[in-house]
Image (spheres, rainbow, N blue to C red):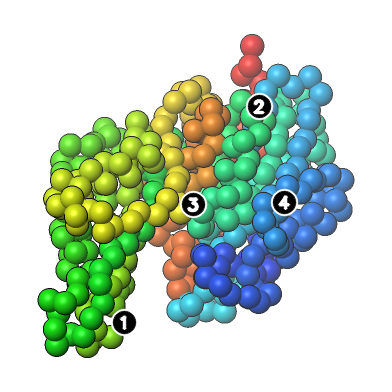
C-alpha cells in the first residue's frame, strides 16, 4: 500500500463511533483511540501536535506547519468520528480493498479525506516548498452529531485565511450548503382514566394541532424562503412520542424538529418563525401548555462569501492533477464549514468520495480519488501561497 492508503486502512480499523447522544459505553465509541493513533503517526514523522479537550474522550488534534516566508495560512478540517454501525452488511472495522475501493465504516465519511489531508501536511513539512502557504490541520470531534469540535475551533480566530473542509464531494467544490437546527417541543396535558377522557387533557391531541401548524409552516417556507443555489429552506417533524398506556389519557407528548436553513437565515430566526406559526394556530391557553427546548443542534449554513479567488485557484489545481474541470456547487447537508464560516473564515468543502456511499451498510471509497485528493491538497497549498502578492 502507498502511504495514504495505508493510513486510511489504519484509521478505518480504529473504531471512533459517535454515540449520537445515546447513553452507551464501549471501546468502539468516541474518538480517543483515533486521536492517540494520529498523535503518534504525526510524531513519527516529525510533526508536533496539540490536543484541545472538548469533552471526556474527545480531543481536537491540531497540527501546524509554518513555511518560512509564507504569506498565507490554510486551515484543513477533517473530523475523526463516524456514524453508528448497526445494520451494516460488512465488518465495519476491517478495511477491505476490492476493485480499487476500500470498504469500512468511515472510509468515505470522512477518514479518506482525513488521510489525504494528513499525508499532504506531512509532505509539506518534509519538503517546505518556497512560497507555499502554511497549514493548520484540525482533526475535529463530534461532527456527526452536535459539531462541538468545529464550534470550538471556530472560537480560535485568526487561524487561517481560508478553510478547506474534507467531505465526500467527488473531487468537486462545494462553496455553499444548508444549515441544520434541531429542537424539541413538549405538550403538557392532564392524565386520567381513558373511560372518562373529559376529566383530563389529552397532550397528543394538542400536539396534533402543533404538527398540523408545522406542516403548513413547512409548506410556506418552501415557497417563500429560497436560495438561488441551494433551493428552499425546509422543515420536518421527524420524531414523536407520548402517552404512558392506551387506557390512560396522555399527559405528555414530544416531537423533534429538523429545520434546514439557507444563507441569510440564523438558527434563532428559524426557531422563532416556527414558534410564531404555532402560536398563531393555537389558543393562548393551548400555547401555554407547550414548552420549547433550546436547539441541541444549531449549525449555521455556508454562504459562498470571500471564496472566489480560492475557488478559482482550487479549480486550476484540480484540473492539473486530474485532467478534469470540477463543478462548483451547493449541498443540502451541513458540515464543519458552517461554524467556521459563521466565525468569519471563508470556507470551501472538498474531498474524495461520494456522499451517496457515506453512512451506508457497505460504506466504501474510491482509492484513486483518495490519492488524487492528497495531491490536490498539497498542490493547492503551493498554488494558493504562490498567488499572494
Which class describes the residues within 10 Å of circle 1: few (<14), some (14-19), or many (20+)?
Answer: few
- The mark nearer the N terminus, 1 or 2, is 2
Give the secondary structure at mark 2.
loop
Residue 88 visible here? yes
Kindly identify which residue carries mark 3. 168
Query: Residue 358, image x and y in percent?
Result: 46, 61
Q: Of callouts 2 and 3, which one flags the residue occurring earlier in the amino acid sequence?
A: 2
- Tell me if residue 234 comes above or below residue 360 in the rendering: above
State the CA–CA distance, disc 4 to disc 2. Answer: 20 Å
Residue 10's place in the image compared with 126, above or below, is below
- Residue sticking out furthest to the front: 199
Which mark's residue is nearer the viewer, 3 or 1? 1
Which label belongs to residue 53? Answer: 4
Tag 1–tag 2 contact (CB < 8 Å): no
Q: Secondary structure at mark 1?
A: loop
Residue shown at 12%/76% (left/top)?
198
Residue matched to label 2: 158
Q: Nearer the viewer, mark 4 or mark 3?
A: 4
Camera-side residue of 326 and 194: 194
Instruction: Give the residue number, with chain letter if any, for mark 1.
Output: 244
Q: Nearer the viewer, mark 4 or mark 2?
A: 4
Give the distance between the C-alpha atoms of the residues marked 3 and 1, in whole angstroms. Answer: 43 Å
State which quadrant residue 269 falls in.
top left
Pick whichever of labels 4 and 3 is earlier in the sequence: 4
Amino acid at each position: 500500500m502507498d502511504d495514504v492508503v495505508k493510513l486510511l486502512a489504519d484509521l478505518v480499523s480504529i473504531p471512533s463511533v459517535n454515540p449520537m447522544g445515546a447513553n452507551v459505553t464501549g471501546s468502539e465509541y468516541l474518538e480517543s483511540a483515533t486521536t492517540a493513533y494520529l498523535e503518534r503517526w504525526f510524531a513519527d514523522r516529525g510533526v508536533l501536535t496539540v490536543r484541545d479537550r472538548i469533552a471526556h474522550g474527545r480531543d481536537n488534534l491540531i497540527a501546524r506547519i509554518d513555511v518560512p516566508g509564507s504569506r498565507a495560512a490554510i486551515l484543513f478540517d477533517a473530523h475523526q468520528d463516524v456514524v453508528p454501525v448497526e445494520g451494516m452488511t460488512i465488518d465495519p472495522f476491517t478495511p477491505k480493498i476490492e476493485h480499487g475501493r476500500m470498504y469500512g465504516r468511515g472510509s468515505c465519511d470522512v477518514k479518506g479525506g482525513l488521510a489525504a489531508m494528513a499525508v499532504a501536511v506531512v509532505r509539506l513539512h518534509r519538503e517546505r516548498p518556497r512560497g507555499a502557504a502554511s497549514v493548520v490541520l484540525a482533526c475535529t470531534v463530534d461532527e456527526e452529531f452536535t459539531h462541538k469540535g468545529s464550534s470550538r475551533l471556530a472560537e480560535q480566530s485568526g487561524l487561517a485565511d481560508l478553510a478547506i473542509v474534507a467531505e465526500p464531494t467527488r473531487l468537486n467544490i462545494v462553496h455553499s450548503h444548508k444549515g441544520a437546527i434541531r429542537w424539541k417541543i413538549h405538550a403538557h396535558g392532564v392524565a386520567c382514566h381513558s373511560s372518562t377522557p373529559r376529566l383530563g387533557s389529552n397532550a397528543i391531541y394538542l400536539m396534533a394541532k402543533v404538527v398540523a401548524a408545522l406542516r403548513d409552516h413547512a409548506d410556506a417556507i418552501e415557497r417563500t424562503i429560497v436560495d438561488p443555489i441551494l433551493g428552499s429552506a425546509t422543515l420536518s417533524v421527524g420524531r414523536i412520542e407520548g402517552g404512558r398506556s392506551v387506557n390512560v389519557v396522555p399527559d405528555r407528548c414530544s416531537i423533534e424538529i429538523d429545520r434546514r436553513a439557507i444563507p441569510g437565515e440564523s438558527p434563532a430566526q428559524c426557531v422563532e418563525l416556527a414558534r410564531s406559526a404555532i402560536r398563531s394556530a393555537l389558543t393562548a391557553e393551548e400555547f401555554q401548555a407547550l414548552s420549547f427546548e433550546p436547539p441541541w443542534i444549531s449549525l449555521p449554513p455556508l454562504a459562498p462569501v470571500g471564496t472566489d479567488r480560492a475557488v478559482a485557484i482550487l479549480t486550476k489545481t484540480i484540473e492539473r492533477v486530474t485532467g478534469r474541470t470540477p463543478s462548483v456547487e451547493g449541498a443540502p447537508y451541513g458540515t464543519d464549514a458552517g461554524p467556521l464560516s459563521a466565525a468569519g473564515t471563508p470556507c470551501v468543502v472538498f474531498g474524495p468520495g461520494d456522499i451517496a456511499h457515506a453512512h451506508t451498510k457497505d460504506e466504501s471509497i474510491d482509492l484513486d480519488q483518495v490519492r488524487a485528493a492528497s495531491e490536490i491538497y498539497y498542490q493547492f497549498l503551493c498554488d494558493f501561497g504562490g498567488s499572494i502578492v
